[in-house]
Amino acid sequence: MLSGLQEHLNRTLPNTSFKEQRAYRAVYHKLSNLIIVEIENHKLVAKKAPVVGWFKKLYPETSDFLLTLPQVQGLNSAWQWYTNGITIPGLRNKIHPYYGTYFPTRFEHLELFDNWLKRYSGPKKSAIDVGVGSGILALQMVKHGFQKVFATDTNPNAIIGLTEMMGDTKLSRKIELDFGSLFGKWKNKTELIVFNPPWLAETRGLNNLDAAIYYNDTLF
Ligand SMILES: C[S@@+](CC[C@H](N)C(=O)[O-])C[C@H]1O[C@@H](n2cnc3c(N)ncnc32)[C@H](O)[C@@H]1O
């Protein structure tokens, strides 16, 4: 269906200049959102459709429903990231980003932080990680001997995902989470505060994933 759609657009719309490409993408977006996919018994009703575990996890009480194709594509890629995991240089275990949670696709800053932590010789009683996301900075600090990391995020999925990931393991006693803005409920003084913040100025209304990238004028 998607290649049919693409073919139709290629036949009917120019797609060379910047303006034309934007218009092309807008029509593609509009039309692909008109394709509705059926979910029955938490599974996609389509031949050779991939398994997307989020249907059951996110909608445990509703087994039959409809989603648009772009939504299904988004859920499918997120499921692949979550189940296959992502290898982060310097961390022994893969991270498994929960649905709708930010994860890095470039690692230079993490290598930089790892090197900084290697050389840091101050006390390591506790640290705060503002905007913990998939937990990478917190995990790096634990790896380098921080006894406790107090972390926050305004995205509930980040908190739910890390709570699930840590379960009842030793890690869950090292990383404490709070669903809140900036320092959330943490009032304690710590040796270190880290925040890998959203880095672009906001231009429109944000959803949770956008809020990992775009900041509003009050954040800093
Ligand atoms: C660029 S991501 C970094 C995530 C993670 N620390 C990392 O380095 O991969 C920014 C994170 O900050 C969170 N965030 C944005 N505004 C926040 C706020 N006011 N308070 C707490 N967290 C916030 C986002 O939800 C997102 O998880």
Image: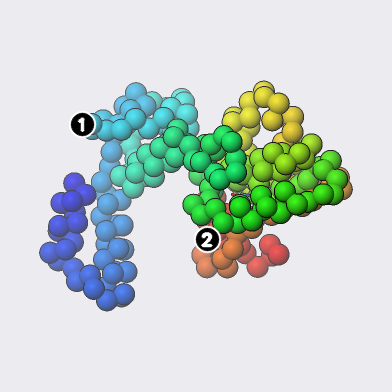
Say few, some or many: other residues with alpha carbon within 10 Å of mark 1 (under 14 / 14 to 19 / 20 or more): few
Tell me: is circle 2 under 8 Å from ligand 1.
no
Give the amino acid at mark 2: Gly
| Quadrant placement of the C terminus | bottom right
Task: Tell me what residue is drawn at x 14 percent, y 58 percent.
Answer: 8
Picture quarter containing residue 37?
top left
Q: Secondary structure at mark 2?
A: loop
* Disc sitting over residue 58 in the figure: none
- Disc 2 target residue: 205
Q: Looking at the picture, does residue 214 appear above or below residue 82?
A: below
User: Where is residue 143 drawn, in percent x and y?
Assistant: 69, 39
Task: Tell me what residue is drawn at x 25 percent, y 55 percent.
Answer: 31
Evaluate whether residue 147 shows in this view: yes
Give the amino acid at mark 1: Lys
Q: Earlier in the sequence, mark 2 or mark 1?
A: 1
Task: Tell me what residue is drawn at x 60 percent, y 43 percent.
Answer: 90
User: Where is residue 12 drawn, in percent x and y?
Assistant: 14, 66
User: Where is residue 50 drawn, in percent x and y?
Assistant: 31, 33
- Disc 1 target residue: 47
